DNA sequence: GAGGTAATGTTATCTTATAGCAAATATGCC
DNA sequence: GGCATATTTGCTATAAGATAACATTACCTC
């Protein structure tokens, strides 16, 4: 007997927790987390890296589900509206939100080498951006911060390669 | 009159100045600001709003110039590499850089209503982001900040739309 | 179970961006 | 100048990302 055939990088418990919280939030808000929407959220959470819409679509099709691009994009739109996921504009990919209960624009640390993404959500950054915008009499609706660089793991990798 | 010292809202003199500075910088760096590249930079600067690649291509064709998408994208790649323009990932558009002599990731205030974009380039924001990233042992390569909201003019009303 | 609304299926199309190779042009050298 | 080289541009095709428009299905309420 082979063990679990599923090779998923991010921890199943994270995914489960995220799905449970999404369920709760949607109930509170009176919106419907349908099978499709839940499954798309699950797919996003079960991968270590953020995914593109068409990659998500591929997984849906592997499920045996019918689907075309709009299937995925509509689910993504819903999840974005509910703040359950973020869109990383610089990469055209979608990632699960770690704090879906508080609406916020995303602040992300994106590793150039391994593709991993870390959500910062620093209130200090958000406040400073708000202040700088206000100083220019600009009314802020949403903030988007994407920092490209190298994560601690990939820095270590390079150091050991070099030294 | 530009409402703030740093603005992408451009006048002909801004365009001329930007082109002259680009010329100087490219000479200093030993890279070639060819006719095509100069013209693309000029097109971007002579529009009040940042432009998409295909809009730029349309203008090139109006010039009577031959061209296909790669023509534009290669020029854009060059201008991006030289820091002469920025790419606004959230809108897939390109805007002239106000401080091409100092390499920096962009910080932008994007008006949802009129589409105007202001480049902030706040050192405070850049420093804070750097600090927050460093606290997470993340090595920063480039920062990208895009704030969506409403510019002062559009807050006052939609007068400018009609005129 | 009839009627209305929300969600999904389906086809086609649009926008944005790149791959790959050929032709032209600039640059350096003699 | 004439030639070799590398860079730039022209051009065709296609990949990748996203949406429009309409048909169908599921869900809820009465």
Image (tube, coloured by chain):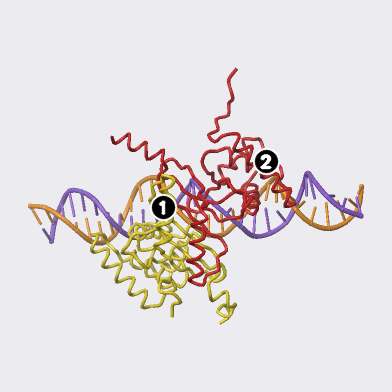
Chain colours: A red, B yellow, C orange, D purple
Element at label 1: helix
| Left or right: C6 in relation to B140 | right
- Which residue does the image show at 26% across and 67% down from the upper left? B24
Residue D9 in the image: above or below residue A34:
below
Q: Nearer the viewer, residue A20 or C15?
A: A20
Q: Where residue B4 sits in the image (x, y, percent)?
A: 44, 74
Kindly identify which residue carries mark 2. A20
Query: Is disc 2 surrounded by few (<14), some (14 to 19) or many (20+) residues within 10 Å?
Result: few
**Contact (Cβ within 8 Å) of mark 1 with mark 2:** no
Q: Quadrant of residue B150?
A: bottom right
Q: Quadrant of the N terminus of chain A?
A: top right
Q: Residue furthest top?
A: A1
Callout 1: residue from which chain? B
In screen coordinates, is A40 left or right of C16? right
Q: Which mark is residue B131?
A: 1
Q: Position of residue A151 (x, y in %)?
A: 42, 43
| Residue A153, above or below B52 | above
Nearest to the eye among marks 1 and 2: give it: 1
């Amino acid at each position: 007997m082979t063990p679990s055939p599923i090779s998923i990088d991010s921890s199943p418990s994270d995914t489960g927790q995220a799905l449970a919280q999404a369920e709760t939030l949607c109930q509170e808000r009176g919106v419907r987390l349908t099978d499709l929407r839940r499954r798309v959220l699950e797919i996003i959470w079960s991968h270590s890296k953020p995914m593109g819409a068409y990659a998500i679509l591929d997984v849906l099709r592997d499920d045996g589900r019918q689907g075309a691009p709009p299937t995925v994009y509509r689910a993504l739109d819903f999840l974005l509206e509910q703040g359950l996921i973020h869109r990383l504009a610089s990469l055209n990919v979608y990632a699960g939100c770690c704090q879906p209960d508080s609406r916020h624009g995303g602040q992300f640390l994106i590793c150039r080498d391994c593709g991993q993404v870390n959500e910062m959500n620093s209130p200090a950054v958000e406040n400073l951006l708000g202040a700088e915008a206000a100083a220019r009499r600009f009314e802020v609706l949403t903030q988007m911060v994407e920092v490209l660089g190298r994560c601690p793991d990939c820095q270590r990798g390079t150091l050991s390669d070099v030294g």
